[in-house]
Amino acid sequence: MDFELSSEQQMWRESVHEFAAKEVKSRARETDEHARFNWEAVGKMGPLGLLGLNVPEAYGGTGIDAVSAAIAIEELGWACGSTALAIAAHNGLACAPLALFGSEALKQRWLPRLAGGQGQLGALALTEPGAGSDLGGGVRTSAVLEGEAWIIVGQKMWTTNASIADVIVTLCRTDRDRMSLILVPTGTPGLHIGPPEKKMGLRGSPTHAVTYDEVRVPRENLVGVEGEGLAQTLAVLDGGRIGIGALAVGLAQAAFEEALQYAQARETFGEPIARRQAIQFMLADAASEIEAGRLMVYRAASLKQRGQPFTVAAAQAKLLATEMAERVTRNAIQIHGGYGYSAEFPVERIYRDARLMTIGEGTSEIQRIVIARGILGLR
Ligand SMILES: Cc1cc2nc3c(=O)[nH]c(=O)nc-3n(C[C@H](O)[C@H](O)[C@H](O)COP(=O)(O)OP(=O)(O)OC[C@H]3O[C@@H](n4cnc5c(N)ncnc54)[C@H](O)[C@@H]3O)c2cc1C
């Protein structure tokens, strides 16, 4: 498969890179240090198309191809993990289920605002205190039809964007064995968003517990087919995993660039540490592994774009790219020596941010299960 980017894709990368360098990377440190969401940059993303990566043009989105969408998340990841995660979740987890499965009325009502017209963001709430990897067995949040309204009761955990979102697409049990996705506007009475979680990294990406205390939303807020919520969620996560893989490639690239520069400037025993083979090998491994991770992400995105099965390719890309990012960011600190352990140097933050990538949107263990099922032909 040929992965030479088209001239449009290259131009897209250059324009996102330029924006990310100016508006996102320049504020990455304070975004993390003060756990402050970068609204200044996000407010400018709508007109650039960065909030409508998964939305067709007919609903105000960019209608761009899946490789270009991955490139955008990669470039944002290069600039700032926190901001990139918020935008990846908005596009890949909130807009995607609406665009893929939403009714015409829901799409027309919500997608243009979410795609950037009015600077609104979305979230997806799947995980609960007792259910993460095992959503099918563990989800307790329930939705019951009462007349023309769904009444939702339950609790979600780790909802990225909850406090900055206008809508939360919520996975609910709608009968004993089946689940459904339901769109909940965040202003709805009975919806309580907890304080931001105190996290190891990604501190500028707000994550919250969300409680549903008899939240009432119209029947037509059902996203897709009643009872098909789990299958729809898994399809959404296939796409989301390409985004997390891309984000991990961006984080690794940023750490590698820092390490490369540092290795050429820092001298020990009379010469730059970049002259030492031990350091060169870490840099060589990083350069090679980043390229491999990037190609796997683009391959999965390209399959998605062409309408071919991409579940296994997305799981492989996420697994390889996120575990690669852990190694590369770890070694970037090693190359910095003691300075790498200091918050004065970006590699410290990038390393903390990268740690989430093997966990969110399906852990590495779950990716291996998905891949094994694919190669063994198991259900
Ligand atoms: C910063 C952050 C942001 C997040 N954002 C969101 C969000 O926006 N929306 C949302 O819904 N969720 C979100 N999550 C939740 C995330 O998706 C879950 O944490 C993740 O899916 C793992 O679930 P869990 O934490 O319940 O771990 P568990 O499922 O309890 O797993 C614990 C450990 O057991 C392993 N394990 C579990 N089952 C198996 C198995 N069958 N075989 C082998 N090993 C297994 C796991 O791999 C893991 O190592 C976020 C989490 C974080 C930390």
Image (cartoon, rainbow, N blue to C red):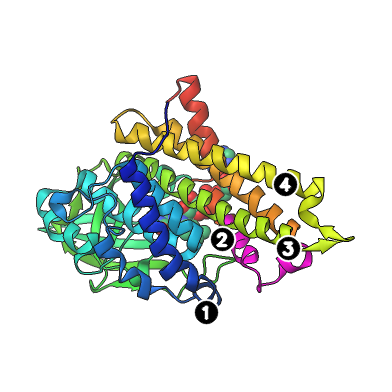
* Amino acid type, residue under disc 3 in the picture: Ala
Front one among 162 and 277? 277
Which callout, 1 or 3, points at the residue further toward the start of the chain?
Answer: 1
Q: Nearer the viewer, mark 4 or mark 2?
A: 4
Q: Is residue 96 visible?
A: yes
Question: Which residue in the protein does label 3 denote?
Answer: 265
- The residues bearing labels 4 and 2 have C-alpha atoms spaced at a distance of 20 Å
- Seen at 21% across and 54% down, the residue is 61
Within the magenta stretch, is there residue 349? yes
Question: What's the magenta bit mostly, secondary-structure-wise?
Answer: helix
Label 3 Cα crowd, 10 Å radius (few <14 / some 14-19 / many 20+): few
Toward which corner of the image does residue 17 lie, by quadrant? bottom left
- The numbered mark, 4 or 2, whose residue comes first in the sequence reads 4
For the point 25% across and 42% down, the residue is 227
Q: Residues within 10 Å of mark 1 (few under 14, many from 20)?
A: few
- The residue wearing badge 1 is 34
> Residue 146: horizontal and vertical position, in percent?
15, 58
Q: Which residues are magenta?
A: 337-354
Q: Amino acid at mark 1?
A: His
Q: Is residue 311 above or below residue 65?
A: above
Tell me, for residue 353, which label it has, or none. 2
**Quick one: which residue is furthest to the bottom in this view?**
34
Q: Is residue 79 magenta?
A: no
Mark 1 or mark 4: which is in front? 4
Q: Position of residue 40 (x, y in %)?
A: 36, 75
Residue 85 placement (x, y as % from top left) = 44, 59
